[in-house]
Amino acid sequence: MDPIEEIKSRIDIVDLLREYMQLGQAGSNYKARCPFHQEKTPSFIVSQPKQIWYCFGGCNDGGDIFKFIMKHEGVDFAESLRILAQRAGVELQRQDPQASSRKTRISDVLDHAAHAFAASLKKSPRAEIARDYVRERGLTADLVDEFLVGYAPADGDVIAQYLLSKKFALQDVIDAGLAVKRERGYGSYDRFRGRLMIPIRDVHGHIVGFGGRILEEKEGSGPKYLNSPQTLVYDKSRVVFGLDRAKQEIRKQGYCILVEGYMDFFSVYQAGMQNVVASSGTALTAEQVRLIKRFADTLLFAFDTDAAGGNATVRGIEVALSEGAHVKVIELPRSQDGRPAYKDPDECIRKDPAAWQRAVQDAKGFLDFHFERVLAPCSRSTDPHEKRKAVLAFFSVLRLVPDRITQDHWIKIVAHTLDLSESVLWEEMGGRQERATQRGEEVRPRSRIAAPDREEVILSLLISDPTLIDSIRDILDPTMFLQESHRAACATLYEHGNVHDQSFADRLTMYAEYAYAALDERERKRTLVLLAAQMRERVMRTRIQELRALMKSAEQSGDSVAVDRYAREFSNLVSSGYTIQD
């Protein structure tokens, strides 16, 4: 079987797209908000029987699983084939590294490097320090194998030389972020040296980079954690560590636990909560939140309790709230003096796993958490200045929430708690434009469905239900369609009851099901007849204007035969009820 057809036979489009968005049932199809443009009204339709998708909104574009991956991941067809072949378990013929695309070469470099690092951790005598660290942190052999944890030798260019021996070019190794060209002289040196190596994967499970943990902290050894630089395959703002492993469990549990580092991630994952992901050295971005929200809308933040962790938590929460996520906070246990008993989830799990379980179960909505910290202490205050400070602090977060109902809920609570007027609080909150401006956002109008033109709407109804053809056959002649392809499609429908272009038929059938699913057969027929009559009216009015111009031209040239012919047609149209428009 052709590999493309084999991949299509193994991957259901609905299962695939559910990894990118939350699909809702819409009759025989599925619908969602389009991932390629911002919209409030779902206009993205997926047909499971036809195994295609189409956006009837701002994109007005569609296709199969390959087209979706190409558009979403920004890759060419060859790379989409590679991504989906790996998912489907279809073997593609291996290409020579030098002949493959640049992205593919970089991916191959990273894959070879990851396996080399993993082998080094297991077998190299010089990796004993890394094996000791793995044991000390309690990482099991199964977890090390599952995540392909490895060791980068401390020598200058070991990994680069290994990759060169595998016929990769030095530039490929540099482009993959694994080697750095020497400023003076020839050659390069390894970016990662003497570090525990943790592969970073995209949502599909492809290795796109590495996080390296230093094992001997000494002068000149660099940062504690070193991540791969931005590369052709690694965009830090669009990758969430561990999501490839966690996505199914996130969907199953209905929420995602977000921790700060690799070791926190491994501890939570080993503790049996596999719906966990980690930030990897960068502040949480809107793109990362949207990525997580493909699988669940609820995010539980569990970051370190130190100052840096607290700041990262707040920044991440602000981004998540702005993206419409339901945000909760996991509070680690505190000692009797009120201080955190553990500095991070990893320490908590290793010392008191039951306490961690309770902390997750008791996770509190962030607005509840923020209310208790900021507003509750002022509940008995009579100082208006103190109340105003508290309100401003609380509203700085509440403004980030795009949901008006949630805002109204909290306005009522704040008004009751501080004995203030709701109308005054709404004034303080400001209008939609002000809130958006404070976030540096553009205020966009509500999305509208970009429906096909009248000709395609008519054809969509005929293709989806050929029994309607006779209801307009006498109203609308195929020659009345402006586009040649539409004239041909109508003529074929009138003669055979179908059209030859299957992709055209599929798209218009999906539109008819999407736009007219709520109408019964009688209402559909009335709609079609009305549209056909409007189109005929337009054609006739246009023809009247043309005939006036033709008669004038014929009179000027003295062609009386042509004048009579045009005049008879003109008279027939006018007598049929079509008005003359200047």
Image: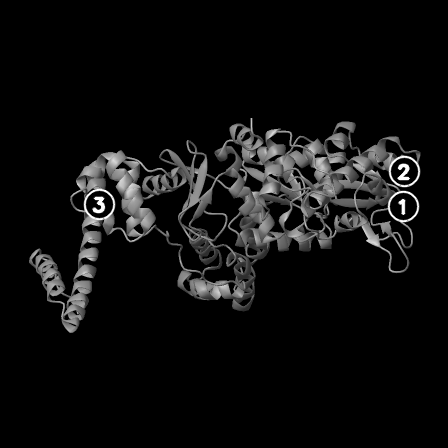
Label whose residue precedes the other's in the sequence (1 or 3): 1
Question: Foreground residue, 165 or 135?
Answer: 165
In the shown orientation, is residue 462 left or right of residue 171? left
Percent coordinates x, y for residue 494 in the rendering: 24, 38
Label whose residue precedes the other's in the sequence (1 or 2): 2
Residue found farthest to the bottom: 556
Q: Quadrant of residue 62?
A: top left
Badge 3 marks a residue whose secondary structure is helix
From the viewer's perspective, is residue 197 above or below residue 551?
above
The circle drawn on residue 527 is 3
Percent coordinates x, y for residue 255 in the rendering: 56, 39
How crowded pointer 1 is (Cα within 10 Å; few <14, some 14-19, many 20+) is rated as few
Question: Foreground residue, 499 or 318?
Answer: 499
At 13% across and 71% down in the image, what residue appears? 558
From the viewer's perspective, is residue 212 above or below residue 447?
above
Residue found farthest to the top: 1
* Of marks 1 and 3, the one in the foreground: 3
Q: Amino acid at mark 2?
A: Ile
Q: Amino acid at mark 1?
A: Glu
At 90% across and 38% down in the image, what residue appears? 129
From the viewer's perspective, is residue 351 above or below residue 548?
above
Question: What whole-number distance in Å separates the C-alpha atoms at marks 2 and 3?
Answer: 75 Å
Answer whether residue 358 is visible to the viewer in this image: no
Badge 1 marks a residue whose secondary structure is loop
Label whose residue precedes the other's in the sequence (2 or 3): 2
The circle drawn on residue 72 is none
For disc 2, the marked residue is 129
CB of mark 1 within 8 Å of CB of mark 2?
yes
In the shown orientation, is residue 456 left or right of residue 290? left
Q: Amino acid at mark 3?
A: Thr
